[in-house]
Image: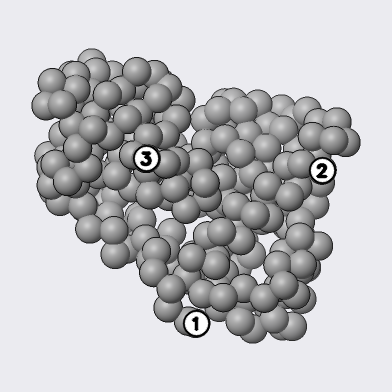
Amino acid sequence: MSRTVVQPGPQVAELRSEVSVDALYDKLVRRDDVSAQEKAVLRDVLGPSTLVAAGNDLVREGGWPDVSTVLVSGFAARYTTLADGGRQITELNVAGDFVDLHSFLIREMDHGVVALTNCVIRTVPHRALRHLTEAFPHLTRLLWLDTLVDAAIHRQWIASMGRRTALAHLAHLLCETYLRLEVVGLAAERAFDFPLPQSVLADVLGLSTVHVNRLVAELRSLEVVNWTQPRVVILDWDRLAGIAEFDPTYLRLTRQPV
């Protein structure tokens, strides 16, 4: 799949440039202190902002990227395509995520990353990442931790696909997405925008669109969420987390110096 890009104007690019650093910074500082120098380094290595239209790849399955991509705004997803053309989404990406930091080391991509909504991205050349890892060991450890959290998210998604009920799987997704968006200032007071159609949620949950529609209706009937596209309001966090058996430990949202 090709990437359709549009270059935003200078003022938009400047604004989103700061947002991208702040969202990534907010994620890292939630876990440990980040010095002013380290924040400046992150800002310096990021390339210009680029707008990618919904439905286009940020990272191509089977590609050999020489940059890693930071999501500035929008929703993206890692996915694997099957021989019959079916698609399984294996993780959602939100603002502040390095969607393919691991491509710095694994080279050939065994999955793709697609823009689910219009997305603004910035890229970091791998040569700049190599210099960063050699010159800033603490920042390197923080970015390494970020990739480990990605792996933890994948483990939870595997558990959901294999052992959680469909309702618990959707509830877990909502709890996880809320907390990840809250960290970067895109969710508050148990409410967030989640502008993904049920066809995309079907690819996330491994279900039919009809089944997803029934699950959403069931959560509404249980009065744990008020879900009017694109806005999700969690009415009863404890009950939703109970349905999901949700434990946020894997997101590593506490400060533990690395």
Using the image, tell me which numbered label, if any, was put on residue 258.
1
How crowded is the residue under tag 3: few (<14 C-alpha within 10 Å), some, or many (20+)? few
Q: Residue at x 34, y 18 (%)?
A: 228
Q: Distance between the residues labelled 2 and 3?
A: 29 Å
Using the image, tell me which numbered label, if any, was put on residue 76.
none
Q: Mark 3 points at which residue?
A: 189
How crowded is the residue under tag 1: few (<14 C-alpha within 10 Å), some, or many (20+)? few
Do labels 2 and 1 touch, CB within 8 Å? Answer: no
Query: Is residue 51 positioned above or below 108 on the image?
Result: above
* Amino acid residing under circle 3: Glu
Q: Where is residue 74 in the image (x, y as percent from the top left)?
A: 57, 35
**Lower sequence index among marks 3 and 1:** 3
Q: Where is residue 229 in the image (x, y as percent from the top left)?
A: 39, 19
Using the image, tell me which numbered label, if any, was put on residue 14.
2
Q: Where is residue 108 in the image (x, y as percent from the top left)?
A: 59, 56
**Lower sequence index among marks 2 and 1:** 2
Q: How far apart are marks 2 and 1 (CA)?
A: 31 Å
* Amino acid residing under circle 1: Val
Which SS class for mark 3? loop
| Viewer-nearest residue: 198 or 162 | 198
Do labels 3 and 1 touch, CB within 8 Å? Answer: no
